[in-house]
Amino acid sequence: MAQFFDLHPDNPQPRLVERAAEIFRTGGVVIYPTDTCYALGCHIGDKAAMERIRRIRRLDDKHNFTLVCRDLSEIATYARIDNQDYRLLKSLTPGPYTFIYQATKQVPRRLLHPKRKAIGIRVPDTPICRALLSALDEPILSTTLIMPEDSDPLTDPYEMREMLGHCVDLIIDGGFCGTEPTTVVDMTGDTPAILRAGKGPAEALGL
């Protein structure tokens, strides 16, 4: 059965954060809260853990995972960002947006959009995510926790434990964080284009 950590949403306990980071590092699949929905995550370099997430959500190999990053400087390691985009991202991160960018060579090939060589990146605005990412010192490979038969994400960590306790390694209870996903913005063209309207307001993008 999965371990179950109750983390304080504003002041996550350092001892539990470090234990959670170690589970990520050693190939674990983790359910954790973000500033939009609960997510399934694993270490960026762990192919086996990524495949476990695919099986849980019944995703095909065309599904695009997101790199959940600590800050703007970490984003720049994995995405090709010009100066104009940098100013926009600085104003919108951390926040409820996922940005699609051309990937750098630091991104494993298996994570890339097969035709465009693009990757989704985001910086959540929540103390738990910040603490986890700081302890890991690298991004979390992530996807929203939506079960195959559902249209909305799971919201109750105790229900998650009942349903998924046998197929993940850790569930982090950080309280209720909602069901509205991020706003997804394609940054690979000449101007930003919203691919999915979500929690992040479109007006902030100047669109």
Image (spheres, rainbow, N blue to C red):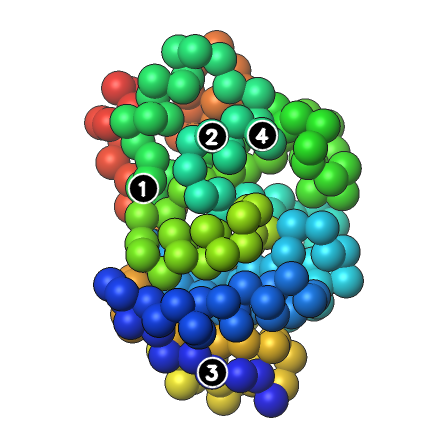
Residue 151 percent location from the top left of the image: 44, 63
Q: Residue at x 44, y 74 (%)?
A: 16
Label 4 with label 2: CB-CB less than 8 Å: yes
Q: Is residue 149 left or right of residue 63?
A: left
Residue 91 percent location from the top left of the image: 28, 27
Circle 3 residue:
4
Name the foreground residue: 150 vs 200. Answer: 200
| Quadrant in which the N terminus appears | bottom right
Circle 4 residue:
77
Q: Nearer the viewer, mark 2 or mark 1?
A: 2
Name the foreground residue: 12 vs 143. Answer: 12
Q: Residue at x 33, y 40 (%)?
A: 94
Q: CA distance from mark 3 to mark 2?
A: 31 Å
Q: Is residue 76 above or below residue 191?
A: below
Q: Earlier in the sequence, mark 4 or mark 3?
A: 3
Q: Earlier in the sequence, mark 2 or mark 1?
A: 2
Q: Answer yes or no: is residue 10 visible.
A: yes
